[in-house]
């Protein structure tokens, strides 16, 4: 016979009394999100654009202040996961 810890719960189902714990294994929701398929089912909490200065930019140097910044779209998920994608279109990348 398998113990509860040897038989991992595959699908998170919220507990009636504590919505952050699974009703089958009493582990938190985060422990159920182990693969990319599960991450795609997580709810995004916030998303938007983030502009980053290129690595090695010296803001004291006026010539480097005008370098193009890198723009990334990011999604923050309810379990704390973060996904982002680089925007490589030259027309949409803002100047410094």
Image (spheres, rainbow, N blue to C red):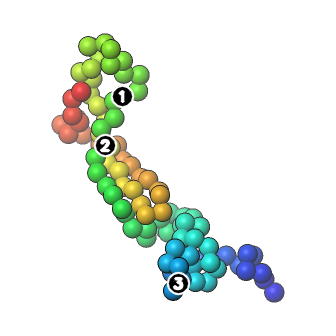
- Residue 13 seen anywhere in this rendered image of the structure: no
Please name the residue that numbered disc 1 is placed on.
Answer: 54
| Label 3, label 2: how far apart the Cα atoms are | 38 Å
- Circle 2 residue: 50
- The alpha-carbon separation of the residues under discs 3 and 1 comes to 48 Å
Residue at horizontal 20%, vertical 39%?
92
Q: Does the CB distance between marks 3 and 1 fall below 8 Å?
A: no
Q: How many marks?
A: 3
Q: Residue furthest right?
A: 1
Question: In the image, is residue 55 above or below residue 5?
Answer: above
Please state which of residues 30 and 84 is positioned toward the viewer in this rendering: 30
Instruction: Answer with the quarter of the image where residue 35 lies.
Output: bottom right
- Is 47 drawn above or below residue 50 in the view shown? below
What x and y, as percent, mark residue 43?
39, 67
Identify the image quadrant of residue 34.
bottom right
- Badge 1 crowding class, 10 Å Cα cut-off, few under 14, some 14 to 19, many 20 or more, is some
Q: Looking at this view, name the residue that lies furthest to the left.
A: 91
Observer-nearest residue: 41 or 91? Answer: 41
| Residue for point 59% across, 67% down | 31
**Badge 3 element:** loop
Closest to the camera, between mark 3 and mark 2, is 3
Circle 3: is it few (<14), some (14-19), or many (20+) Cα within 10 Å?
Answer: few
Q: Which mark is residue 17?
A: 3
Tag 1 secondary structure: loop
Q: CA distance from mark 1 to mark 2?
A: 13 Å
Horizontal and vertical percent position of residue 95 = 21, 29
Work out whether 9 lies above or below 73: below
- Tell me the quadrant of the picture where the C terminus can be found: top left
Residue occupying the point 18% across, 37% down: 91
Residue 43 in view of the camera: yes
């Amino acid at each position: 016979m398998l113990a509860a810890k040897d038989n991992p719960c595959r699908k998170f189902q919220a507990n009636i009394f504590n919505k952050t714990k699974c009703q089958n294994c009493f582990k938190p929701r985060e422990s159920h999100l182990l693969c990319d398929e599960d991450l795609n089912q997580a709810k995004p909490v916030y998303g938007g654009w983030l502009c980053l200065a290129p690595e090695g930019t010296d803001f004291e140097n006026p010539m480097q202040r005008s370098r193009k910044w890198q723009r990334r779209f990011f999604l923050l998920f309810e379990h704390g996961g973060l996904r982002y994608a680089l925007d490589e279109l030259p027309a949409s990348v803002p100047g410094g």
